[in-house]
Image (spheres, rainbow, N blue to C red):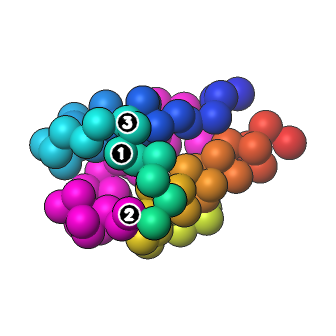
Amino acid sequence: MPTNLTHTELSALIKGKAGIFIDPRDLQRPETTFEEFGVDSLGLLGVVGELENRHGVQIVDGAEMAKTPSEFLVAINNSFAKAGS
């Protein structure tokens, strides 16, 4: 069962899939959007795909449509929790 995705892991995934480095501390600001970081929906889709492949879990909570890192982490971690149930 996958563990909760952290800001640090999300930062690394965004760097790997979207080619954009974001300091994990900046991802913790709840009001900041992915758009402000320059990450678009295709970049998030790449991150979602990587997580699905890596963990064998289908992400069902619409994470690729998240506007903020906080929303994204909630959607991903909810999917992980459902998969572990």
**Residue found farthest to the right:** 85
Q: Are marks 1 and 2 in contact (CB under 8 Å)?
A: yes
In this view of the protein, which residue sits in the foreground, 29 or 65?
Answer: 29
Say whether residue 65 is left or right of residue 74.
Answer: left
Where is residue 38? Give x, y as percent: 18, 61
Residue under circle 3? 24
Say whether residue 61 is left or right of residue 28.
Answer: right
Vertical placement of 44 versus 54: above or below?
A: below
Callout 1 secondary element: helix
| Residues rendered magenta in the picture | 32-57
Residue under circle 1? 26
Q: Are marks 3 and 2 in contact (CB under 8 Å)?
A: no
Residue type, label 2: Thr
Residue under circle 2? 32
Where is residue 62? Give x, y as percent: 53, 68
Compare marks 3 and 2 and give the one earlier in the sequence. Answer: 3
Q: Is residue 64 visible?
A: no
In this view of the protein, which residue sits in the foreground, 42 or 6?
Answer: 6
> Mark 3: few, some, or many residues within 10 Å (few <14, many ≥20)?
some
